[in-house]
Image: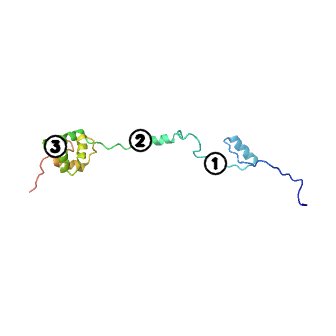
Amino acid sequence: MTDVDWDAKTVIGSKRSVAKVTRKDSDLNAARRTGAVVGTDKKVAAGGNKAHQGTDHQRIAKLDRENEVAPPSKIAPSVGRAMQDARMELKLSQKDVAQKINEKPSVLQDYESGKAIPNPQILGKLERALGVKLRGADIGKKLEAPKKST
């Protein structure tokens, strides 16, 4: 017990120095003047209202709306009417015509009602089956018989 220093102070219950977080420039400069180690970290998306995170998401949404691809055009009502007239003239049902062109009757219904997206292959089949022009300028005009070359 001879090597114990009775003059040294032991402080019980003292607080350790904890890193201080500040948002003020004056506190930051004061710490730098005293020679303390200062670290600055910017918090990314900490706290705040997530519903209102700034205008970035608004700008991006606006760009998305501007670059929106237009929905594909539907078939013209005049084509549907020409199909229906030609079918009635041949006294065929939608089911019969659909069977002739190897398509489902629902496809033919969509074309006649003007809800279908035009498909050139299906329109070509319909033109041959009904004998009516369904594409181009003169829709509804009878197709001429193919010219035979001899």
Q: Which residue bears the numbered disc 1? A: 41
Query: Under tag 3, what secondary structure?
Result: helix
Q: Position of residue 41 (x, y in %)?
A: 63, 48
Circle 2 residues within 10 Å: few <14, some 14–19, many ≥20? few
Q: Are marks 1 and 3 in contact (CB under 8 Å)?
A: no
Q: Which mark is residue 85?
A: none
Q: CA distance from mark 2 to mark 1?
A: 37 Å
Q: Tell which circle, 3 or 2, labels the residue nearer the N-terminal end.
A: 2
Q: Closer to the camera: disc 3 or disc 2?
A: 3
What residue type is disc 3 on? Arg
| Picture quarter with the C terminus | bottom left
- Using the numbered discs, state the Cα–Cα distance from disc 3 to disc 2 in whole angstroms: 43 Å
Q: Indicate the amino acid at tag 1.
A: Asp
Can you identify the residue that label 3 sits on?
Answer: 87
Q: Is residue 22 left or right of residue 44?
A: right
Kindly tell me whether residue 77 is visible in this rendering. Answer: yes
Q: CA distance from mark 1 to mark 3?
A: 75 Å
Give x and y (percent) for residue 147. 11, 52
Determine which quarter of the picture holds residue 138: top left
The type of residue carrying mark 2 is: Glu
Quarter of the view holding residue 76:
top left
Q: Which mark is residue 66?
A: 2
Considering the image in quadrants, where does the N terminus appear? bottom right
Q: Position of residue 2 (x, y in %)?
A: 91, 61
State the SS at label 1. loop
Q: Residue at x 74, y 46 (%)?
A: 33
